[in-house]
């Protein structure tokens, strides 16, 4: 057997999703070397349909760090959302409440922009690798992998970063005795569709109804993204277009509002849960994004949290290499986790406030409407939602 080809770098990054690529990009700008390896192909990642809301802080980082300004040109700025319940819509005016906005710009486009920027800048990003394993995270980490041509490598680095998503291999490198895993399961999932139809609304509609939750989002002038709450064991084959549209009508239409309908071109069930693994550092291994935490999609926080982790980790690594101070790097986990738990709370709150469990009794349904009313009838309630949704100021 041929010996492994040895390569060295400063930071080995496991995963070329938005988090891994953004970290590699920021590091390169301050002269820190990284190698990114990814088991999926570039094409596979770019064809996966993901969520689409970016906080203003995420947009600023993409634009100000020179990744791309395409989000400003092609993304849609949203100054609010609608909460719909009891057949009525209530606008949450982000601009008025907190002076901020979000952008509808699918995660796939964030990936494409980052991948193109890393390529143009000569970044070392290797897709479609196999047989990955990480060794010695406590000391000087070594990563083994085989590239798409079948060449076996040994990658030696100062640090290894687990940006390898919700099925992270890296998170399991932290021994059980050194970590805590926090879980919360929900008794429902989302049925997501892409439909060929004109927009039904300029802004996102988060709809609560006695028949369950629905979310009306958009993609383009002619393709829309929508979800409805379903059973986690739901089978997409059982749902033809008529049945899907009847479900949406039951949850969203009413009082003069009607969704625009059209052919369903994609459908999927998205199970969800809340998860955190802490701490986010073990020796010279750092976890970022979904590798360390998962939130239900109701608060639109997943990608934004991952990018915030990366920003904080970058500041730590920059300070370690360029100012010879380890203090910021040592505080990475605590600084990142503070926002992670705020986002866990917000996502849990939005989820439980808007979804209706199948076994909800009259009390819980009436209490839920009381909760929704207390939010929309109070400037403080609305401002809490607006601040969390658009993104809290970054950790300092
Ligand atoms: C989406 O457009 O896919 C989307 C938007 C907001 C969410 C979740 C998903 O909270």
Image (cartoon, helix red, strand yellow):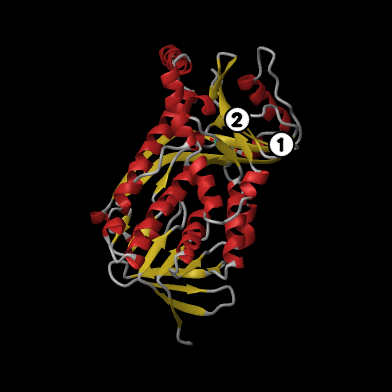
Q: Quadrant of ligand 1?
A: top right
Q: Secondary structure at mark 2?
A: loop
Q: Is residue 310 left or right of residue 266?
A: left
Task: Reply above or below: 223 against 151.
Answer: above
Would you name the residue on which mark 1 appears? 195
Circle count: 2
Q: Kindly report the distance in space between the C-alpha atoms of the residues bearing marks 2 and 1.
A: 15 Å
Q: Residue at x 48, y 55 (%)?
A: 19
Quarter of the image for residue 133 reads: bottom left
Q: Is residue 329 left or right of residue 77?
A: left
* The residue at label 2 has a CB less than 8 Å from ligand 1: yes
Q: Which marked residue is nearer to the observer: mark 2 or mark 1?
A: 2
Quarter of the image for residue 235 reads: top right
Which label was assigned to residue 270? none
Would you name the residue on which mark 2 appears? 204
Question: Residue 223 location in percent, x, y?
Answer: 72, 38
Question: Residue 246 location in percent, x, y?
Answer: 68, 24
Q: Earlier in the sequence, mark 2 or mark 1?
A: 1
Question: Depth check: 243 or 256 in front?
Answer: 256
Question: Depth check: 330 or 164 in front?
Answer: 330
Q: Residue at x 62, y 46 (%)?
A: 71
Task: Reply above or below: 256 against 313.
Answer: above
Question: Residue 247 location in percent, x, y?
Answer: 64, 25
Residue 357 visible: no
Question: Depth check: 281 or 209 in front?
Answer: 281
> Furthest residue to the bottom?
2
Residue 170 visible: yes
The local crowd at label 2, few if under 14, some if 14 to 19, many if 20 or more residues have their Cα within 10 Å, is many
The local crowd at label 1, few if under 14, some if 14 to 19, many if 20 or more residues have their Cα within 10 Å, is many
Q: Secondary structure at mark 1?
A: strand
* The residue at label 1 has a CB less than 8 Å from ligand 1: no
Question: Residue 57 location in percent, x, y?
Answer: 48, 43
């Amino acid at each position: 057997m041929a010996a492994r080809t040895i390569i060295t770098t400063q930071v080995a990054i496991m995963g070329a999703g938005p988090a891994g690529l953004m970290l590699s990009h920021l590091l390169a700008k301050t002269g820190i070397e990284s190698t990114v390896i990814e088991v999926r192909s570039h094409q596979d990642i770019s064809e996966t349909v993901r969520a689409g809301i970016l906080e203003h802080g995420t947009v600023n980082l993409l634009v100000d760090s020179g990744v791309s300004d395409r989000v400003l040109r092609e993304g849609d700025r949203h100054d609010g959302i609608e909460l719909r319940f009891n057949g009525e819509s209530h606008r949450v005016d982000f601009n008025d409440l907190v002076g901020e906005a979000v952008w509808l710009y699918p995660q796939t486009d964030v990936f494409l922009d980052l991948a193109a920027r890393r390529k143009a800048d000569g970044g070392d990003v290797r897709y479609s690798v196999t047989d990955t394993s990480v060794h010695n995270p406590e000391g000087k980490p070594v990563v083994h992998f085989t590239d798409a041509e079948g060449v076996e490598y040994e990658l030696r680095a100062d640090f290894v970063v687990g940006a390898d998503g919700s099925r992270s291999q890296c998170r399991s490198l932290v021994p059980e005795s050194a970590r805590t895993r926090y879980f919360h399961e929900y008794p429902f999932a989302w049925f997501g569709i892409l439909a060929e139809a004109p927009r039904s609304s300029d802004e996102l509609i988060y709809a609560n109804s006695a028949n369950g939750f629905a979310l009306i989002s958009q993609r383009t002038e002619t393709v829309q993204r929508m979800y409805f709450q379903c059973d986690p064991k739901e089978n997409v084959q059982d749902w033809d277009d008529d049945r899907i549209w009847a479900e949406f009508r039951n949850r969203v239409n009413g009082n003069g509002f009607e969704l625009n309908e059209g052919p369903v071109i994609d459908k999927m069930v998205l199970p969800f849960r809340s998860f955190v693994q802490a701490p986010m550092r073990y020796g010279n291994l750092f976890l970022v994004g979904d590798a360390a935490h998962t939130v239900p999609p109701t608060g639109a926080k997943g990608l934004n949290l991952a990018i915030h982790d990366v920003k904080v980790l970058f500041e730590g690594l920059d300070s370690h290499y360029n100012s010879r101070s380890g203090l910021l790097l040592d505080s990475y986990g605590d600084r990142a986790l503070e926002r992670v738990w705020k986002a866990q709370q917000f996502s849990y709150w939005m989820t439980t406030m808007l979804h209706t469990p199948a076994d909800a009794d009259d009390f819980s349904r009436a209490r839920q409407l009381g909760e929704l009313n207390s939010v929309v009838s109070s400037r403080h309630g609305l401002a809490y939602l607006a601040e969390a949704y658009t993104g809290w100021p970054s950790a300092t």
